[in-house]
Image (tube, rainbow, N blue to C red):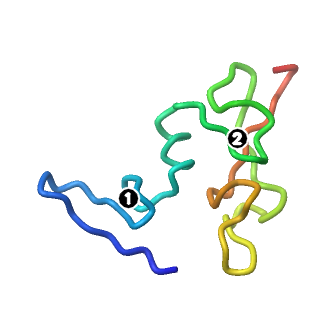
Amino acid sequence: MADERTTSPAGSTTGTLGAPGGTSTRAAAVESGSGEMAPGDEVPPETPGSGEDVCPDCAGTGGQGGDPCPTCEGTGRITRAIGGA
């Protein structure tokens, strides 16, 4: 799927997936710290004692067979519990 970008009157870029820059909604949620979890996340983003890791199912590419990875929802990252989180 090609990423079609448009520029709003204010000059910000939006993509076809509805989030700034054309990122997935989940990726935008992670970047904004809203705490939305992907299926592969062990804990919500921003949880104390957690950290990002490469998605084990797509090896960080964000895709599988031409489609977004269902585990990380296309971001290539998951959130793991570290040290008992």
Q: Residue furthest left?
A: 9
* Residue 74 at x, y percent in the picture: 63, 61
Q: Residue furthest right?
A: 84
The amino acid marked with disc number 1 is Gly
Task: Tell me which label, 2 or 1, sits earlier in the chain.
Answer: 1
Left or right placement of residue 83 versus residue 35 in this view: right
Position of the C terminus, as image quadrant, is top right
Image point 62% across, 27% down: which residue? 46
* Residue 65 at x, y percent in the picture: 74, 80
The amino acid marked with disc number 2 is Glu
Occupied quadrant, residue 3: bottom left
Image point 14% across, 51% down: which residue? 10
* Residue 28 at x, y percent in the picture: 48, 46
Q: Is residue 84 above or below residue 70?
A: above
State the mark number for residue 52.
2
Q: Secondary structure at mark 1?
A: loop
State the mark number for residue 30.
none
Image point 36% across, 75% down: which residue? 4
Image point 69% across, 30% down: which residue? 44
Count neighbours of disc 1 (C-alpha within 10 A) and say few if under 14, some if 14 to 19, many if 20 or more.
some
All told, the count of numbered labels is: 2
Q: Secondary structure at mark 2?
A: strand
Pointer 2 with pointer 1, Cβ within 8 A: no
Left or right placement of residue 84 versus residue 23 in this view: right
Count neighbours of disc 2 (C-alpha within 10 A) and say few if under 14, some if 14 to 19, many if 20 or more.
some
Task: Name the residue tied to disc 1.
Answer: 21
**Mark 2–mark 1 distance (CA, rounded to whole Å):** 21 Å
Q: Is residue 10 above or below residue 15?
A: above
Occupied quadrant, residue 49: top right
